[in-house]
Every structure is written in C-alpha cells, then in structure tokens.
Image (cartoon, rainbow, N blue to C red):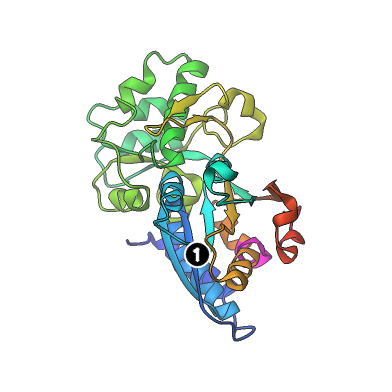
Amino acid sequence: MRLFPSALVLTTLLTALITGPSVHAAGGTVNVFYAGSLVNLNETLVGPAFAAAEGYTYQGKGAGSLAIAAQLKGKLAAPDVVELADPAVDRQLMGPSNGDLVAWYLTYARSELVVGFDPRSHLAPAFRAVQHHHLSWYRALEQRGLRLGRTDPNVDPKGYRTLFMAGLAERVYHLHHFARRILGSATNPSQIHPEEVLVARILTGQVDAGVFYLSEVKDLGIPYIPLPAKINLGSTRYKHLYATQRFATSHGTVVIGAPILFTITIPATVRNSEGAQAFVRFVLGRRARVISAAHGLLSLPIAIGGERHRVPSAILALVGKG
C-alpha cells in the first residue's frame, strides 16, 4: 500500500518523534488484535515504536471489530490486547453469557465518517467542487456510475455506521430514498470490501470513493470531503439524533447509532500480561497520542467501561487524562 507524499513526510517525522531507545530489555511477544481502520497506524508507526521503546516484540492483526469479537467467542484467537472501533462490541464480550472475555475497556479516541475519493477518478471533479463549497456533499455521491466502497455492516462498525449516515441524511436533509439510491441493499456485494483492504482499493483505483474514518484518510493523505456533524457520527452533541438509527446484524445483534469511539482492553485470552499492560500504557501515553491525533484519531479523556476494580493499577492511573 503506497503512501501519498504528504502522508509519507508526516509518517517519517512522527516515527522519529515517538521512536526512541529501548528503556529496558522486556521479553516476549505482545499479540494485538485491532479494528482494521487502524492497520496503517499500528503496523507502520505505533507497533514498531512500542517495540523500540519497550523492548517487546509487537505482533498485530487487523479485522472488523465484530469479526474480532466472533473470533474471541469462537476461541479462534487469543490476543493479549484488543482495540475496537465501538464500545458496544466490547460489551458483547462481557458477562458470564459471553465467557467473561472482557471485564473492562477504556475509551481513548474518537473519529468521524468522511468520504475519501480517488483524485485520478473521472468523477473526482465533483468531490473537488464539494471541497470548494461549490456543490452539496450529497450530489457527489449521487453521480451516475460512482463505484463506492464500504465495509460489511455484519462484521465492521464502520459498515453499519455507513448505513446510519445515509439514514440520517434522509431524516435530516429530507433526501428521498437516499440510502437506497447510493448504497443499494445493506450488504450490496458490489460495494462491500474487507475493512483492512478498503484503503488499498481506493489507492489502486478499484473504487472511485469510499466511506472512511477521518483517521484513515489523514493517515494516508487520501483527499476527502467532510460530512455534516449531524450525520457523521462524530459529535457527542448529536448523540440522541444518532440513536434514531438501528441495524440488526445477521447474528441477531441490534446495534444503535452513537458517536464513534475507539477502545482498548486486555481480554481474558491474554498470555503476556506484562507486555499487554505495557502496550496499553504506550497507546494511552503522550507520545502515541500525539501521533494518533496527527493521523485523525482524535484524543479524548480516557474513560472506563465495565468493572473499574479489574483495571490494572498501572493503567488505572491514566484514566481521565486527555
């Protein structure tokens, strides 16, 4: 996957910023499963920087958050750390009925939905017109022949958030049948791509545009158009409006619209407890949060979900910091 020039420069500078000499000779591998939207951030920056600074071996794997949850429930994976793109997915792993796979989680970052586009596409001029306020955002998405990419709502929060965005657009801006016109069915196979490869689809010209998190497009320098706060799921101010949207997954789970929040936790499958705690502290620390914010994963004061008394003391000390 190639970086656009501006992103390459930013990546180089930020790698230098957060990578330093190893502070101690730790041991073992830390196995991190994370939401696929974090793949470039984790694999090219945060993971290597953690390994250099803390002395552990980093091993990461990206997938849709619901797919990660399914792997944990099916005992198909045993990560030390899990980073997900929706607190609701963490809650699906909590309690005796879910094998007590997760006892607590920390929300630490937020993002919003945007539409990234391929600047080489013959349909790109409409998106540029939106950027210059010469065209309404939804007109660019209504172009005939637009190849739009998105993720599967049954395995990835961004997938069902895309449906919520379109539904909110209908409600707020009175766009008749907007969701059906630009998306087709909820799981339209001509648009669905795995989260961890959707960025590659736009970089290689296989789609004209795609629905992404702000962190993804800023991460790789992909040009994009922002979406209004009432529909981008990025503002706590509109959380009650977002909550008007619902989607029932193929597994029967009903998800409700809410602001986009990213979480991190140490699940019951942990094998390297010390390494897992070190990774969580690193992700929540100042240096990693600087790079995350620069890449569009915007910082929040760290908050606890679940059982506070189960959070390791060294991590608990970071709660409330922004």
> Dividing the picture into quarters, in which one does residue 229 lie?
top right
Residue 137: percent from left, percent from top: 43, 29
Q: Is residue 4 above or below residue 164?
A: below
Q: Which kind of residue does numbered mark 1 sit on?
A: Leu
Residue pictured at 33% horizontal, 40% vertical: 209
Can residue 295 be spotted in the picture?
Answer: no
Residue pictured at 60% horizontal, 69% vertical: 273
| Residue sitting nearer the eye, 228 or 110 | 110
Residue 172: percent from left, percent from top: 52, 18
Dot 1 lies on which element? helix
Main SS of residues in magenta: helix
Determine if the magenta segment contains residue 286. Answer: yes
Count numbered badges in the picture: 1
* Residue linked to disc 1: 10
Q: Is residue 234 above or below residue 182?
A: below
Residue 318: percent from left, percent from top: 74, 60
Is residue 180 left or right of 68 when viewed as pictured?
left
Determine if the magenta segment contains residue 112. Answer: no
Residue 168: percent from left, percent from top: 49, 23
CA neighbours of label 1 inside 10 A, class few (<14), some (14 to 19), many (20+): some
Is residue 156 left or right of 233 when viewed as pictured?
left
Image quarter of the N terminus: bottom left
Image quarter of the C terminus: bottom right
| Residue sitting nearer the eye, 272 or 9 | 272
Residue projecting furthest to the bottom: 25
Region of the chain picked out in magenta, as a range: 282-288
> Dividing the picture into quarters, in which one does residue 54 lie?
bottom right
Can residue 48 be spotted in the picture?
Answer: yes
| Residue sitting nearer the eye, 181 or 61 | 61
Q: Is residue 189 above or below residue 46?
A: above
Is residue 271 left or right of 64 when viewed as pictured?
right
